């Protein structure tokens, strides 16, 4: 694939390795030329000690930047002042500017988010909003585009952002191909406050509970009422309900509802199936039941969700 414009990654000492590696791999595979630049042009070490070879000083890249990418740093650490100055100068000449995770704090400190919507890692959203009142913070978004500036949520959301940039530059088929290669969603369902429910609860300590939660994911349309779930776990309904609350923080019914909603979200985003068919495949049984559940959980209908999140690029 031919080159698609320079991506300059603005890095400083202690940059988060995963914030760099994920999006850069996507952009490299898409044919972009990626260069690392630091405030003084010297090599840097990531937060885990992995060295990054830097090709130039950030400000010396001004004029040749297509995309300026700013990864994140530990939120408890102060934003490096020399990095802020360099990003401010380089950002003025870039076609677009993107940040991963707490890289949004660097952009905000540089004044590049004033009057814009933005997001960052959910742990740093309050910090961003309090320190920079001129920024409209969206704490639930995976990534936010406001004009030529794109900010993304924590860590792996940098991959989501990079795929969005690839889709913009090369079209949806190239982005979808890369997403499949990476074994990730082209467009992740929900927002960062709506993490994958199965992944977020971790591995239940109880073997009976593990059977139950995995059975829901394995067959969404099966009977997942409390009695049926308790039978699979060989537990009383009362005991299962207590275990669910202790280990997941939710009731069995809430868990089933969330898993079905997530499955429906993915199908609405990535398929041409009718809403009624998706409702059946997701275990809701009827379109009306799915509609009521979407309104309850997500505050929108399945049709509205699809129109908002479905990929429409040619």
Image: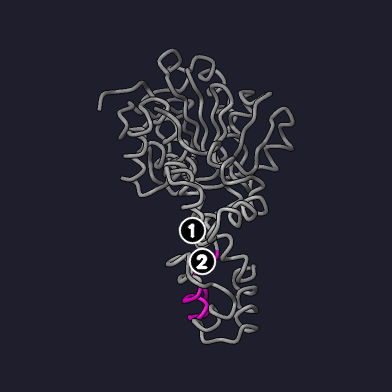
Q: Is residue 125 above or below residue 224?
A: above
Determine which quarter of the picture holds residue 255: bottom right
- Determine whether, in the image, residue 9 is placed left or right of residue 134: left
Q: Earlier in the sequence, mark 1 or mark 2?
A: 2
Which of the colour schemes (rainbow, by chain, secondary structure, one colour) is used? one colour
Q: Secondary structure at mark 2?
A: loop
Q: Which residues are magenta?
A: 201-212
Determine which quarter of the picture holds residue 130: top right
Which of the pair 209/101 is nearer the observer?
209
Q: Which residue is mark 2?
A: 202
Q: Which residue is mark 1?
A: 280
Which residue is at 34% across, 46% downward? 182
Residue 49 lies in the magenta-colored region: no
Q: Is residue 269 visible?
A: yes
Which residue is at 67% across, 36% downward? 137
Residue 202 lies in the magenta-colored region: yes
């Amino acid at each position: 694939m031919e080159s698609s414009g320079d991506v300059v990654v603005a890095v400083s000492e202690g940059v988060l390795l995963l914030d760099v590696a994920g999006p850069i791999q996507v952009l490299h595979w898409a044919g972009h030329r990626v260069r690392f630049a630091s405030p003084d042009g010297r090599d840097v070490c990531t937060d885990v000690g992995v060295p990054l070879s830097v090709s130039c000083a950030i400000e010396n890249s001004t004029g040749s930047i297509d995309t300026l990418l700013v990864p994140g740093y530990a939120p408890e650490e102060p934003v490096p002042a020399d990095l802020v100055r360099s990003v401010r100068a380089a950002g003025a000449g870039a076609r677009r500017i993107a940040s991963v995770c707490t890289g949004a704090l660097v952009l905000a400190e540089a004044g590049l988010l004033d009057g814009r919507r933005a997001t960052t890692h959910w742990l740093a959203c309050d910090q961003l909003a309090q320190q920079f009142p001129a920024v409209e913070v969206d704490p639930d978004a995976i990534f936010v585009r406001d004009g030529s500036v794109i900010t993304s949520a924590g860590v792996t959301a940098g991959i989501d952002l990079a795929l969005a940039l690839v889709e913009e530059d090369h079209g949806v088929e190239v982005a979808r191909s890369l997403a499949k290669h990476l074994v990730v969603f082209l467009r992740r369902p929900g927002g960062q406050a709506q993490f994958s429910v199965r992944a977020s609860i971790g591995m239940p300590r109880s073997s009976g509970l593990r059977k139950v939660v995995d059975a829901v994911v394995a067959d969404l349309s099966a009977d997942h009422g409390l009695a049926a779930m308790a039978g699979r776990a060989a537990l009383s309904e009362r005991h299962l309900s207590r275990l669910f609350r202790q280990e997941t923080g939710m009731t069995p019914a809430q868990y089933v509802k969330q898993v079905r909603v997530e499955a429906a979200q993915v199908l609405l985003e990535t398929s041409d199936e009718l809403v009624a068919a998706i409702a059946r495949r997701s275990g809701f049984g009827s379109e009306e039941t799915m509609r009521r559940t979407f309104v309850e959980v997500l505050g929108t209908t399945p049709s509205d969700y699809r129109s908002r999140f479905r990929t429409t690029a040619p």
